[in-house]
């Protein structure tokens, strides 16, 4: 997929004429991420046994992107961008017994991972301002941590960070797409979804894949 992504960018860049108006833009916003796959299904089945005391939830994070948009004709173009995305997942312990609630017992397991991504998107503009984009994306893992937190009566019992970077697949190949609307002043509102195709486990023993989506506000020059 890396070769395809590079070829797509090169071909796309040579496809437009010298008179085409190339534009540049930046975007920033928040995203929601989780993990999907057979391993996560098994984990959720185990959580079902706890009768709601333990649950996997989505994790909120930050995303930012800078891009170049190249029009091919009035309603079609290509866009390539470099992005930063916080991904991962969260597991929360919600202890529903009266005694544990009295003690205000809490436990969280948070996995924040950070990626730098490169995408190459086909861009359709059905009407002025509105755009629909989709294409391949390759992301490189910068850091992957596991944060373990537990407390009782507001006092921390466990506060530990574990570095999982060396055990995580460095490259995440996937697909991404979204929809956006650019106002005449250059400001845009955008929504996107990223679908990871590479297992996050470096040895591919655990079939779990990144999934994330978010909203951003941007400005195009």
Image: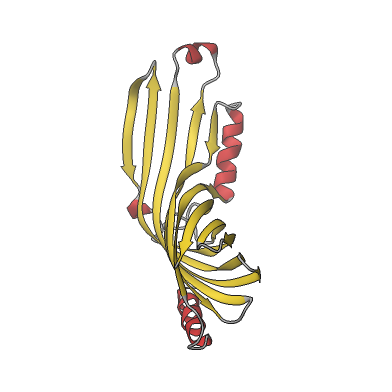
**33 or 48: nearer the eye?**
33
**Residue positioned most to the front:** 185
Instruction: Quarter of the image for the C terminus: give it.
Output: bottom left
The answer to whether residue 151 is left or right of residue 130 is left
**Residue positioned most to the right:** 126
> Whole-percent x and y of residue 52?
59, 27
Residue under the point 55% across and 40% down: 43
**218 or 166: nearer the eye?**
218
The answer to whether residue 57 is left or right of residue 168 is right
Give the quadrant of residue 135. Answer: bottom right
Residue under the point 45% across and 74% down: 2
Q: Give above or below for 52 relative to 215.
A: above
Residue 8 visible in the picture: yes
> Whole-percent x and y of residue 181?
59, 60
> Whole-percent x and y of residue 39?
55, 47
Q: Give above or below for 6 relative to 166.
A: below
């Amino acid at each position: 997929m890396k070769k395809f992504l590079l070829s797509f960018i090169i071909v796309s860049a040579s496809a437009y004429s010298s008179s085409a108006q190339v534009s540049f833009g930046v975007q920033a916003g928040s995203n929601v991420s989780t993990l999907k796959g057979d391993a996560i299904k098994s984990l959720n089945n185990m959580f079902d046994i706890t009768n709601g005391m333990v649950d996997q939830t989505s994790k909120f994070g930050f995303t930012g992107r800078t891009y170049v948009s190249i029009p091919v004709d009035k309603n079609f173009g290509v866009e390539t961008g470099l992005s930063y995305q916080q991904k991962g997942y969260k597991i929360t312990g919600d202890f529903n017994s009266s005694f544990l609630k009295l003690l205000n017992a809490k436990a969280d397991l948070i996995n924040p991972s950070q990626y730098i991504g490169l995408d190459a998107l086909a861009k359709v503009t059905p009407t002025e301002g509105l755009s629909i984009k989709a294409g391949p994306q390759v992301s490189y893992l910068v850091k992957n941590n596991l944060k373990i937190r537990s407390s009782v009566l507001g006092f921390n019992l466990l506060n530990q960070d574990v570095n999982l970077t060396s055990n995580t697949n460095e490259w995440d190949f996937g697909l991404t797409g979204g929809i956006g609307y650019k106002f005449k002043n250059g400001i845009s509102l955008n929504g996107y979804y990223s679908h990871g195709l590479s297992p996050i486990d470096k040895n591919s023993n655990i079939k779990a894949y990144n999934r994330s989506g978010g909203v951003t506000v941007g400005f195009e020059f």
